[in-house]
Amino acid sequence: MTHAPTLPFSVGAAATRTGANHAENEDRHRVLDASHLGVAALRRGSLYAVCDGVSTVPRGRYAAELTCARIDGFFDRFQAPRVESLVQLVSETDWELRAHGRGQAACTLSMLWLAYGTATVLHVGDSQVYRVRNDTVERITKTHRGGRALGAYVGMGPNVADVMQVWQEPLFVGDLFLLVTDGVTEVVAVDDLLDTWWAFGGSPQRAAAAIIREVDQRGGRDDATALVVDVLALETDPDGESTFSGRTEFRRARGD
């Protein structure tokens, strides 16, 4: 017996702040879900992302802005998107950053796509994605580091597709996802992130804002962004589309 794939109804909200050491905030984020009528009408799922401009290059903010701008066009561009569509999007953005940023533009990227009963994460860099299920927190992403330096980022070159982490697993009602830049994880423990969610009544907007307030109160020196996503329902997809490859990762970051 076969079952039609399902689309999620999810809500996401983000909050961000400029770090004490920074003149401007180089973090960017995207929330593309049912709150956008155009995205909801396309029925291709929901897409969430956080980007952190690399501060050691002159055009980190530009890199984060361009990456988010390209993410904006994902649903319009790919009529039948797959995981490989996201990989292609990131690879093309990497090329664009190198062509127009002249080697001076780089950012991290952690992206969550919820579609057809599947959660998909694409990750490059040191931002993190956590999933909370049945009160258990799991860190999905792995930090790309080469010693103390960032080991992978968008804008690094063609081998970004080789080091990119891609993760897939079935999606369930009640799943909670937290996408946070390193400005959050450097000062707030993951258990505190979950406590904040429960303390603020299961509201993504209030929880995201509370996480950033906590970073501020602890004197966070880096830019910080928190994006909270709550999966509220699953509905049958009449077109019978599916993105699930049956593998939790088809490409694994080097050194993992």
Image: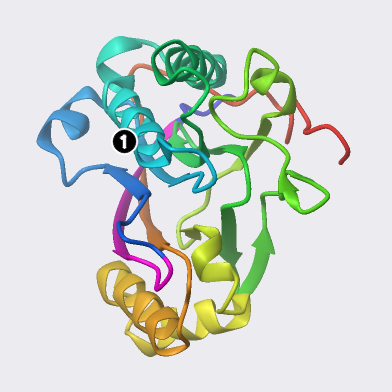
- From the viewer's perspective, tell me whether residue 204 is left or right of residue 36: right
The quadrant where residue 64 appears: top left
Q: Position of residue 201 (x, y in %)?
A: 32, 84
Q: Which residue is mark 1?
A: 65
Rendered position, 174 above or below 251: below
Q: In which quadrant is the C terminus drawn?
A: top right
In depth, the one of 89 and 171 nearer the eye is: 89
Q: Which residue occupies 15% across, 40% down?
A: 36
Q: Which residue occupies 60% across, 42% down?
A: 170
- From the viewer's perspective, tell me whether residue 126 is left or right of residue 89: right
Q: Position of residue 94 (x, y in %)?
A: 51, 19
Rendered position, 232 above or below 197: above
In depth, the one of 23 and 181 nearer the eye is: 23
Q: Secondary structure at mark 1?
A: helix
Q: Main secondary structure of the magenta part?
A: strand
Q: In which quadrant is the N terminus drawn?
A: top right
Q: How is the image coloured?
A: rainbow
Q: Which residue occupies 42% across, 62% down?
A: 223
Rendered position, 195 above or below 82: below
- From the viewer's perspective, tell me whether residue 38 is left or right of residue 113: left
Q: Is residue 2 visible?
A: yes
- From the viewer's perspective, tell me whether residue 142 is left or right of residue 198: right
In magenta segment, residue 154: no
Q: Write down the region rendered in magenta.
A: 6-21
